[in-house]
Amino acid sequence: MTSGFEPRILAFICTGHPLDLTKRLRGRAPVDIRMVKVTCSYRIEPEILLEPFLANFDGVLILECPLDYCRSRTETDSGAEIFHEIAALLDAAHIQRDRLCLDRIPAIKGRGLYDIARKFAEKMISLGPLHLNKLSREKLRTLQNNLETRRIRGLVAAGLSQVNTRKTGKKRMCPPSGAARRDEYIKNWLSVLIEENPITLMHIGEVMDIEVRHISEYLLAMEREQRIKISAVLKEEISNLMFS
């Protein structure tokens, strides 16, 4: 065990649960756990789950809601398939797969949620800080890019999107009939990116290849949905942009 080490953990929490789990966990967790709300753990894009490790988080926790409360999937759907895929990719990047955890939130009892967080935090403390060397970081970024390329190709093949090439030569997804899925993908990315502190609208725009004005609109919408809390610095930047 590493003495005095407090792990950085990012938790993806499903919003399908009848209780506001972020409020229940915040302030009670054994360590500082950052929380990202998602509509369904089954819909988290795999490449998004790799980003926290690149952003120097020590562990990633995926919390599925009870099936009885799920509004987004069938009994055969689960985040388990994505979990096993990402765990294998972590192995390829020489990162312990124990740094990724998938668990199901108890139906009502908040104590169960606390126990899940405590056990995962203890596991991260026993593993110690995640130190990515240059080779592992490059490997992880390559795997992430490969996942995104595969996803875009899949959407194109399914007729849900079209890929346009901008003057910069970068590709971006422009789905005419898959707008809801694209919006959720963007919101999930934003939820992760704003956990990187400090971060600016310009930085987010460069990473996601989206105009900063559109990013501002997404962030404000997500705050209204109570999925994120915009920092004072970002809020001032958004305000200056909107009224410029």
Image (cartoon, helix red, strand yellow):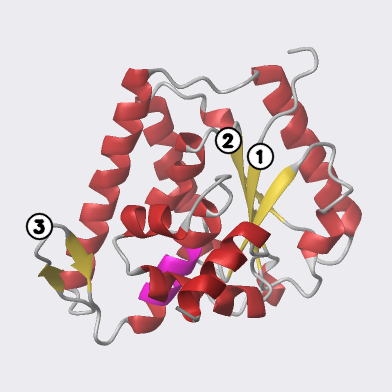
Q: Residue at x 77, y 61 (%)?
A: 22
Q: CA distance from mark 1 to mark 2?
A: 6 Å
Quadrant of residue 149 within the rendered picture:
bottom left
**Residue 145, how many percent across, how many down?**
26, 45
Mark 1 touching mark 3, by CB under 8 A? Answer: no
Amino acid type shown at disc 2: Phe
Mark 1 touching mark 2, by CB under 8 A? Answer: yes
Q: Earlier in the sequence, mark 2 or mark 3?
A: 2
Tell me the quadrant of the picture where the C terminus can be found. Answer: bottom left
Amino acid type shown at disc 3: Gly
> In the image, which residues are magenta?
182-188
Compared to 64, does 15 lie above or below? below
Compared to 6, does 46 lie above or below? below
Q: CA distance from mark 2 to mark 3?
A: 31 Å
Amino acid type shown at disc 1: Ile
Q: CA distance from mark 1 to mark 3?
A: 35 Å
Q: Residue at x 35, y 33 (%)?
A: 140
How crowded pointer 1 is (Cα within 10 Å; few <14, some 14-19, many 20+) is rated as many
Which residue corresponds to mark 3? Answer: 169
Identify which residue, 204 or 20, lies in the foreground: 204
How crowded pointer 3 is (Cα within 10 Å; few <14, some 14-19, many 20+) is rated as few
Which residue corresponds to mark 2? Answer: 57
Q: Nearer the viewer, mark 1 or mark 3?
A: 3
Instruction: Specify the label residue 9 is tagged with.
Output: 1
Q: Main secondary structure of the magenta part?
A: helix
Q: Nearer the viewer, mark 2 or mark 3?
A: 3
**Residue 193, how many percent across, how many down?**
50, 52
